[in-house]
Amino acid sequence: MSDIIHYQRATDLEFELDDLSRPLRQQRPEIHWISTPDGDQGSEWCGRCGHFKVRHLQRHDRKRRDSYFLDGGWRTEEDGFRYCCACGVQLDVGLTTYGALEAIESLDHFGIRPGNAEDAADLSEILSTLAWHEPQNAGAVERAADLAEALLWSAT
């Protein structure tokens, strides 16, 4: 398949997936992390849970309470989808090329749910990441496009 057709298919499917998943994607909170006097905690949080965790940490370390704060709140690029470590909600992140390739393997392994907005959002993010990158990922874009078509067409 030529690069132009390959790109066009991925773009068309990305728009269709986005139509299905837009309400869900708009509700996904930004990723946050907690900075402490001893450094970053290394966990991802939604803003609500992160806020309560910072307050908890501040109450238990009153001498250094001003050194605890919630950082982030913007879209970051990650090697995989991220979830709040407290409530489990999926956070709004972009994927690296590696992350998109891994996500395709995961969807291949666990399968897709026809018409499911979460799978549609994930596939939209995968196609968005890979359609703009290296030609050596053409096979992965084709696989993601096949999964997207299966999700969209089996839902109708």
Image: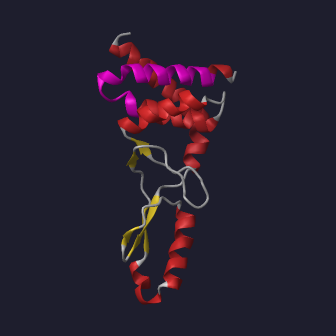
Quadrant of the image occupied by residue 96: top left
Query: Please, which colouring scheme is shown?
Result: secondary structure
Which residue is most to the top?
Answer: 1
Residue 45, above or below 81: below
* Residue shown at 41% from the left, 85% from the top: 64
Q: Name the residue at 57% across, 39% down.
A: 22
Q: How many marks?
A: 0
x 37%, y 20%: residue: 138
Which quarter of the image is occupied by the C terminus? top right
Relative to 146, say whether 100 is above or below: below
- Please determine whether, in this image, residue 41 is positioned above or below residue 1: below
- Residue, far bottom: 63
The x, y position of residue 106, in whole percent, is: 52, 33
Percent of width and height locating residue 114 = 66, 27
Q: Is residue 69 magenta?
A: no
Q: Which of these two is toward me, 31 or 111? A: 111
Within the image, what quadrant is residue 97 found in? top left
Q: Position of residue 31 (x, y in %)?
A: 47, 56
Q: Residue furthest right?
A: 156
Task: From the top left corner, tell me how far across and down residue 16 is, in percent.
Answer: 55, 27
Q: Is residue 109 left or right of residue 130?
A: right
Magenta stretch mostly in which secondary structure?
A: helix
The magenta segment: 129-152
Q: Residue at x 53, y 37 (%)?
A: 122
Is residue 141 shown in magenta? Answer: yes
Which residue is outermost to the front? 109
**Quadrant in the picture for the N terminus:** top left
Q: Quadrant of residue 139?
A: top left
Q: Nearer the viewer, residue 73 or 99?
A: 99
